[in-house]
């Protein structure tokens, strides 16, 4: 038999009555009705509502209270709007990640050109930059009034972290705060027995319980214990756990860029070239001195060896070639004037080439190292090289 609502007098159907907790939700005005006060309580001892101290407004949140609009039948419940900024201090530190990653990708692209892995790197930097941008500009706004809750995240969409939603209080049996991975959330137990996230993610237990209490107050819901919610030892136990999570997040935000910086340092160390020595050409070859400061693996040009270059004289390069079939050789190439000179052991009193392939590969090019000691009729000198790729 339908019960009359003690607030507005409308009939409450059986589908809106919770016999286990002796409460009912009026579909007309959205208020919660205590069945024990109306004599409609179920047999047996009623469950006791949970008494918990109100949580003060947590850091990073704002709350606004406004009068209900005239369109709502229940004029006694003020509406609220709770706003939470996504920006936290750790996000300033995390700015180092896209900055460093962008520098690495740009450097590798200019040195080696297009590759599949560089495209993945660009996509990663773009994704990280966008996700970080949402942290700087986005807000979560929770509005509740007379039986309706609206949750909006924006202005930038971020479906990986948060989704906007709307809930009717008539479908909600209980609200409770719970963990959501490393963060927190306000969840709702619906009349059909399912559990859904109402507001998520939240950064601390205090934020989750504060939102829960404010929504319960506006929607007229009685707070009962729910399995899986945050412990009843709040604020001490839950606050401590939230503090640990916050410290852990701050530590991770600090260590993330450090790890990236170390990885970048290792990359530059493995990919940088080290050269010492010089080669001197006799007058027959032009009378120049080449002090190489850059080298590359001959794998790029299809030979086993290295190519030596100097930024002070970009028109000249020297190739050190190891060839088991044709024999070892030193090739001097000059672009101005265009000339190519090939030197072999037969033209040298001393001809020593030691070139080794390392176990390091960068963009499918094996890194080379070694040395050359020459005393030929037109070229002499000694150079050592490492990290040539």
Image (cartoon, grey):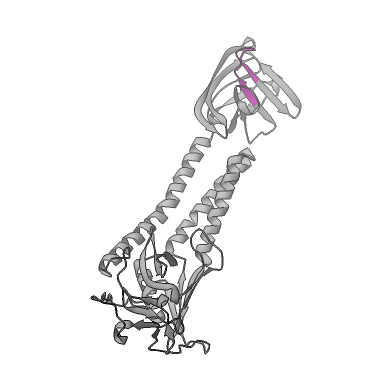
Image vertical order of residue 140 relative to residue 81, above or below: above
Along the line of sight, the residue nearer the viewer: 203 or 377:
203
Please indicate whether residue 356 sits to the left or right of residue 175 in the image: right
- Provide residue 287's location: percent of width, then percent of height: 68, 24
Task: Give the image location of residue 117, x and y in percent.
Answer: 58, 41
The quadrant in which the N terminus is found is bottom left
| Residue toward you, 330 or 147 | 147
Residue at left offset 74%, top offset 24%: 339
Residue, x 34% and y 60% (percent of image)? Answer: 245
**What residue range appears in magenta?**
318-330
Residue 329 is situated, as x and y percent measured from the top left of the image, at 63, 17
User: Which x, y percent locates residue 184?
Assistant: 38, 64
Q: Residue furthest front?
A: 1
- The residue at 47%/61% (across/down) is 92
User: Is residue 328 found inside the magenta-colored segment of the image?
Assistant: yes
Q: Is residue 309 visible?
A: yes
Q: Give the answer, above or below, for where 278 lies relative to 165.
A: above
Residue 209 is inside the magenta segment: no
């Amino acid at each position: 038999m339908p019960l009359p609502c003690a607030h507005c007098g409308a009939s409450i159907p059986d589908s809106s009555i919770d016999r286990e907790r002796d409460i009912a939700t009026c579909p007309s005005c959205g208020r919660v009705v205590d069945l024990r006060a109306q004599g409609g309580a179920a047999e047996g001892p009623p469950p006791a509502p949970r008494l918990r101290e109100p949580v003060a407004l947590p850091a990073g949140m704002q709350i606004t209270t406004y009068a209900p609009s005239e369109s709502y039948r229940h004029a006694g419940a003020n509406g609220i709007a709770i706003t939470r900024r996504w920006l936290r201090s750790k996000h300033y530190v995390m700015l180092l990640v896209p900055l460093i990653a962008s520098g690495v990708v740009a450097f590798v692209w200019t040195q080696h050109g297009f590759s599949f892995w560089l495209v993945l790197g660009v996509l990663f930097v773009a994704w990280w930059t966008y996700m970080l941008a949402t942290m700087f500009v986005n807000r979560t706004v929770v509005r509740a009034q007379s039986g309706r809750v609206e949750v909006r995240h924006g202005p930038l969409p971020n479906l990986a972290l948060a989704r906007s939603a709307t809930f009717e209080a008539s479908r909600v049996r209980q609200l409770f705060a719970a963990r959501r991975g490393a963060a927190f959330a306000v969840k709702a137990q619906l009349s059909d027995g399912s559990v859904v996230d109402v507001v998520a993610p939240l950064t601390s237990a205090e934020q989750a319980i504060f939102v829960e209490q404010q929504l319960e107050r506006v929607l007229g819901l009685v707070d009962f214990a729910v399995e899986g919610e945050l412990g009843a030892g709040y604020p001490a136990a839950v606050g401590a756990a939230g503090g640990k999570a916050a410290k852990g997040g701050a530590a991770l935000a600090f260590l993330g860029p450090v790890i990236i910086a170390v990885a970048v340092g290792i990359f530059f160390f493995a990919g940088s070239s080290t050269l010492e020595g010089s080669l001197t050409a006799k007058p027959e070859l032009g009378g120049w001195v080449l002090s190489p400061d850059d080298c590359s693996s001959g794998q790029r040009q299809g030979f086993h060896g290295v190519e030596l270059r100097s930024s002070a004289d970009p028109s000249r390069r020297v190739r050190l070639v190891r060839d088991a079939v044709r024999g070892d050789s030193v090739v001097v190439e000059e672009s101005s004037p265009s000339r190519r000179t090939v030197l072999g052991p037969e033209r040298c009193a001393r001809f020593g080439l030691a070139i080794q392939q390392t176990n390091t590969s960068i963009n499918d090019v094996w890194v080379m190292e070694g040395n050359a000691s020459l005393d030929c009729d037109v070229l002499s000198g000694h150079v050592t090289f490492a990290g040539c790729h």
